Image: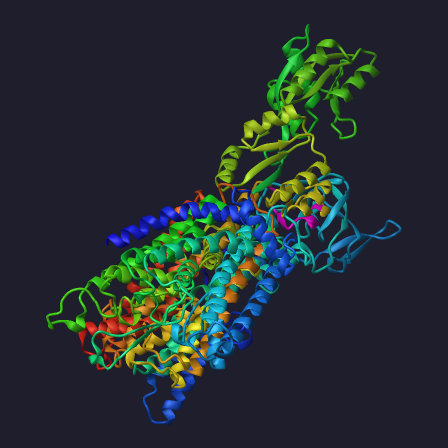
Amino acid sequence: MSAPSLFNAEIVQQGLRASVEGLHPRRLAKSPVMFTVGVGAALCGIFALRDAQRGQPWGDDAAIALILLLTVQLATFAEGLAEARGRAQASALRATRSDTIARRLTASGDEEPVPSTSLRPGDRVIVSAGEVIPGDGEVVRGTATVDESAITGESAPVLREAGTDRSGVTGGTRVLSDEIELTITAQPGDSFLDRMIKLVEGAERQPTPNEVALGTLLAALTLVFLIVCATLPSLAAAVGASIDHSTLVALFVCLVPTTIGGLLPAIGIAGMDRALRANVLAKSGRAIEIAGDIDLMLLDKTGTITLGARQARQLIALGGVSDARLRQAATLASLEDPTPEGRSIVALAGEGVTAAAGAIFVPFSASTRMSGVDLPDGRRIRKGAVSAVSAWIEAQGGASSGAELTRLVEEIARRGGTPLVVAEGPNALGVIALVDVLKPGMKERFARLRAMGIQTIMVTGDNPLTAAAIATEAGVDGFIAEATPEDKLQRVRDEQRAGKLVAMTGDGTNDAPALAQADLGLAMNAGTQAAKEAANLIDLDSDPTKLAQVVEIGKQLLSTRGALTTFSLANDVAKYFVLLPAMFAVSLPGLDALNVLDLSSPRTAIYAALLFNALILPALVPLALRGVALRAETAEARLTRSLVVYGGGGLIAPFVGIKLLDLGLSALGLS
Amino acid sequence: MLTVLIVIVASLALALPLARWLHVVASGAPSPLDRLFDPLDAGIHRLIGWDRAAPMGWRLWARWILTTNVVLGAAIYLIFLAQGALPLNPDGVKGMDWELALHTAASFITNTNQQHYSGQAQLSYLGQLAAVVTAQVVTPAVGLAAMFAALRGLVGGAEGRRTDALGDTDLGSYPNDLVRSITRVLLPLATIWALALTSQGVPSTLHGAVVATPIDAAAGLTEQVIPVGPVAAMVAIKQLGTNGGGWYGPNSAVPLENPTPLSNILELIAIVLLPLACALLIGRMTDRGLGRVAVASMLILAVALCAPVVWLELGANPALAGLGAAGPNWEGKELRLGVESTGLWATLTTMTSNGSVNGMHDSLAPLSGLFPLIGMFINSAFGGVGVGVINLIVYLVLAVFVAGLLIGRTPELLGRKVEVKEVRVAALASLLIPVCVLVPTALSFDLGLANTSNPGPHGLSQVLYEYASAAANNGSGFEGLGDGTPWWNLTCAAVLVLARFIPILAPLAIVGRLATKSAAPRTAGTLSVGSGAFLATLLGVIVTLQLLTYVPALALGPVAEHLAVRSDLSPAVEAK
């Protein structure tokens, strides 16, 4: 999925439309801060009408009302813009969900063509090469390569196979080879894609707990400022000063945290949007925020830390067998083994080896766990799992368990590899050592996670020796070897009891309990339906280290809110320095000592402060939508930097901005 | 300056061992003094029939605090009403009006000691001893007990992690903490201070007033009635328990309450001793880092508040410019005590919620008046006994919230997540004081009931100060205010009660909820509350919150007066 640019004409247009719709009082009431600004605008409008009726000058009241209206509009524009961007993402997703004709199986086993929209969970359909998968489902028969580029943007086809952890398919993707039978798992309109579209469009977005807490704080601050401003005329009267009503409204609006209040919804929507752009479907905004808090990550070894497939690393011939002979036999036996293991053997040993014409290949199958070749000269060669090949040797009348073979097999296992045996007829020739190959860049990723305070635990079915070897090589903080589903679940619970927030990645049905128990479950889109249901994030790329990226998105989401809150509150200090001397310029001229900016007139000072307050919103929209930059640094370093940048910046920016606006306004002759 | 130095060094030197002792008192750790105190405690509990072993969560604490205070408050109120007819009244003092009695009862039950009456003339010995001194001993003990509970809650509850009858996490036993705080902390300290002050000449008697014949009768005074009484005992507990209410109306400015330089130093030390020890207790009971940051924040604020006042008071009084009376601002100060000591006292007494005075705050330089006000608004730069630390919890919650957002993690305090409910309570608590100060101040002027002695900015400062003092449970007055009216008595009584109990109960509610959560282990990603960065955040939150709330009021009051006096331009400035 291509990322739409931050702004394009259509998105901006949609945002503008939303900004007008957002003025509806019911929409406004959702944000107490912006609601009070709206009320302020209305009040100033009324003051203007009243003054006009009394024949008094009403221009300033009207101008303040208009600036306040603009402030509200700019805030709703920000939200509308974020929603429009979400919708653009969603429509890209929706395009993949074209209606197709599905081949549904009837009770009698016949096929009947039905529109994909009429499919219900439990329906069985057949999809052949070249056809589009009609809905979310699980492969129950067959294996196929599927092109999922429509949702992942990844052009390499992926394998989907019944009865494995790679049995899940998504509607809208295309089968490239073979034929599969699947069970539909989602109601029409309720597929992951559908749910995700609703979420990014903002229609079903629930504020996250952190957002609610911040909203509470902002509402309380708004109330404080309401009290401050409501009592101010009485205090002023006590010292013989008076305050113009519109000016008082202006002070109130400048003080309430409009910047963060106006951008809060946009930040939340943009967070979901960033997750989606990383090809992660979040079932809720909360899931992304939890990611920012994760203390511990449980990662499947296979496919996460190591490349899913093992690679042939070494061929060891038994005594009396030449290396060349073993090499040739291993290659010949692997030519018709399309698995990554088989291909890696050919790549390692197959130079210059070709099969004689008339050779009969025995392809690899999961049930025989062997592949091989019967040559025209009568030689029969097999290679495969130790137990399978041993049984085959015995069936040929040979002795399978030579002491030397046993010793080699055990040695490889101890070093963390997987042994395969090569045999010719009744004789074992040697062994192939397969090893797990670490994905590139893993060590760096774990180091980065550690710097963020996240521990990683590798979960593997390997024996402890192998697991320890790989764990050390990958640089994870710990491992669980010979892990059963119960072990995973137990570990998640234990860590949670110790107060940690635990994330877990998984794809298999047996991962589902642990995924559900974990605070954050990340399921692979290729995984089983059960795993996807149990998780709260789904990775369309089926890349389990994606969690690290989601963690950053979560942290960034919170950081952005914190940065804008700090900025918004720090701004108020400067606004006091501008507005208090301006308000009391006539009745308490002594307060002009606070006019540190030396603004040209009280009138331009008030306009400049209000305009700054309004214009800072669009100025910060890009920051709200992109999120603040995150570096790998300690919490203390990040806090210090944020305080300096957003707290210090928030103190200084309005002084500069208001001074410039004042200069501009007085140049226009407004003073 | 010598006084200032002695007070700082001696307070710190005494507060460190006192904090260790408070920890023993709070934790119930065995000590050699148990043989003395245990039978006493057991006797008190048997007498009242309290079960001091039962676990108590925050809701039970709230219930107990309110119940005991209502009972004590009602008893004090009745004594004030009826003192004319009760014994121990050698000078024949009359009972109080109901609304003055209500304000006075509210004032003493809230550890405020705001006085709309003049001590020696309107209280009988029974009123002083049974009502006032009882409250002066019990209310700081309530503060200490509530602080113990709050600090236990920050680390997941009292030892044993029990739950109470309502299912809340145990925060310790209120009766136990209350009685131990009285018998092991307040009474012994007060005894020591009372004896020391008696040695300096502070009256300590139950005889009636002394009658003196002035040498020079030219003033028209043939004889002078000098009320005395058990003054030393009361002054000791008034200072130590951040009470502030003196035996005499002019408080520690009167030679009989504060006769010598040594008594002045002793009383200054007593103002900050327990509040400082409470701050030092945070680290002992919760987390060393948090303790360091808390104490550092309080010390920084204390210096920032004290230094300008001492400096400003040492400066010349601009109103006297050109009159040949150069030198420090002596107006309203005792010549025998000095300008520095009064400046220091004025700031310490306001930021610790004490409220005793040794000079008149009304006469401070206009800008000096700003700092006692800010000290009372913050009310946690040490703050009152126990309650200063409790107030800090609200600031801590807000600071971890902001810091948590900035670093991109759900905010947590000592590993426990600060979520919507905690933030909601903290937000409401921080809303309360502005409402309690600004709304009645505005109403006083709107309704024409302010009754100030000065028009203009100084009058505004007087009214603002009175409500700030009530809301901070401080008790000191800017004076010059005709505050003996029903309006002042009733509005201040309401502010006193609201601003005492909600700021105690709200943090208890917060820690009560936090205590039920399990603490996340510390990782590189969690923010250490012991770090300098967090200290900066905490100070930023405290200062910004106060600035944003009170800048307009302060600008119209002390700042406007200062600017007017300085420029001498505004017609609003009055001749003082």
Q: Residue furthest top?
A: A320
Quarter of the image where one finds residue A504: top right
Say whether residue B126 is left or right of residue B462: right
Q: Quadrant of the C terminus of chain B?
A: bottom left
Quarter of the image where one finds residue B371: bottom left
Q: What residue is drawn where x is 55% and y is 42%?
A: B30
Residue B394 in the image, given as x and y percentages of width and height: 48, 59
Indicate the colouring scheme.
rainbow
Q: What residue is drawn where x is 64% and y is 31%?
A: A309
Say whether residue B113 is left or right of residue A440: left
- B320 or A324, nearer to the observer: B320
Q: Residue furthest bottom?
A: A54
Q: Is there any visible trace of residue A88 in the rendered image?
A: no
- B145 or A239, nearer to the observer: B145
- The mark tally for this picture is 0
Q: Is residue A216 above or below residue A505?
A: below
Q: Residue furthest right?
A: A108
Q: Is residue A268 above or below residue B552?
A: above
Q: Quadrant of the N terminus of chain B?
A: bottom left
Residue B380 in the image, given as x and y percentages of width and height: 42, 59
Q: Is residue A32 magenta?
A: no
Residue A456 in the image, given as x and y percentages of width and height: 57, 37
- A85 or A206, nearer to the observer: A206
> Which range is magenta?
A531-543
- A431 or B24, nearer to the observer: B24
Say whether residue A116 is left or right of residue B388: right
Q: Is there any visible trace of residue B483 in the rendered image?
A: yes
Q: Is residue B113 above or below residue A534?
A: below
Q: Is residue A541 magenta?
A: yes
